[in-house]
């Protein structure tokens, strides 16, 4: 399984370089027969024009069909939407007086004394 994946990855990576490899391997044939500018030796093209055409064909073949420039329109996708029904800001009051509840009776009593409690002395 790993070998098959490795072969597929190699093919995908080498596919754009195939025209260049073909140019290097068949340099003599391309420069003498397939070159478009062979009647203009001052340009020193040597088949590079043919290589550029092949690279353009390879890049056009890699483009997806749906990427037509005529039908490009902005597409907005909403991933998450939650409607907020109401939003209110509650005012913050500092230094407000406590509300007095008259029905509450405070039965707690605290005597603040300065004396310290000592247990009774036990005489045996």
Image: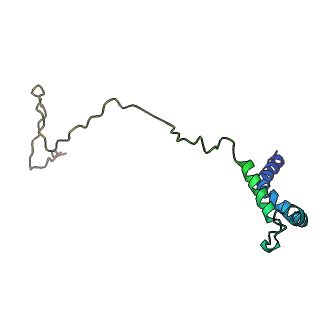
Outermost residue, front side: 39
User: Relative to residue 20, is residue 110 drawn left or right?
Assistant: left
Outermost residue, bottom side: 42
Task: Report which quarter residue 25 is drawn in.
Answer: bottom right
Q: Residue at x 57, y 42 (%)?
A: 72
Location of residue 66 in the rendering, given as x and y in whole percent from the top left corner:
66, 41
Q: Residue at x 89, y 62 (%)?
A: 33
| Number of residue marks | 0
Q: Which residue is drawn at 64% across and 43% down?
A: 68
Location of residue 108 in the rendering, given as x and y in whole percent from the top left corner:
13, 34
User: Relative to residue 118, is residue 57 drawn left or right?
Assistant: right
User: Relative to residue 80, is residue 5 drawn left or right?
Assistant: right
Location of residue 94 in the rendering, given as x and y in whole percent from the top left corner:
16, 44
Location of residue 53 in the rendering, given as x and y in whole percent from the top left corner:
77, 57
Look at the image and tell me in which quarter the N terminus lies.
top right
Q: Nearer the viewer, residue 9 or 35?
A: 35
Outermost residue, top side: 103
Q: Which of 109 and 94 is in front in this view?
A: 94
Q: Which of 106 and 31 is in front in this view?
A: 31
Q: Which residue is drawn at 83% across and 46% down?
A: 4
Q: Which of 121 and 70 is in front in this view?
A: 70
Task: Report which quarter residue 56 is drawn in.
Answer: bottom right
Look at the image and tell me in which quarter the C terminus lies.
top left
User: Relative to residue 42, is residue 123 drawn left or right?
Assistant: left
What coloring was used for the rendering?
Answer: rainbow
Task: Report which quarter residue 45 is drawn in.
Answer: bottom right
């Amino acid at each position: 399984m790993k070998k098959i994946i490795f072969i597929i990855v190699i093919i995908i990576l080498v596919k754009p370089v195939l025209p260049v490899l073909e140019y290097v391997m068949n340099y003599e044939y391309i420069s003498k027969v397939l070159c478009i500018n062979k009647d203009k030796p001052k340009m020193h093209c040597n088949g590079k024009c043919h290589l550029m055409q092949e690279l353009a064909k390879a890049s056009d073949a890699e483009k997806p069909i749906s990427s037509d420039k005529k039908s490009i329109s902005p597409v907005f996708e909403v991933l998450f939407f939650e409607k907020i029904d109401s939003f209110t800001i509650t005012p913050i009051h500092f230094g407000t007086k406590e509300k007095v509840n008259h029905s509450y009776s405070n039965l707690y009593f605290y005597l603040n004394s300065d004396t310290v409690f000592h247990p009774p002395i036990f005489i045996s």
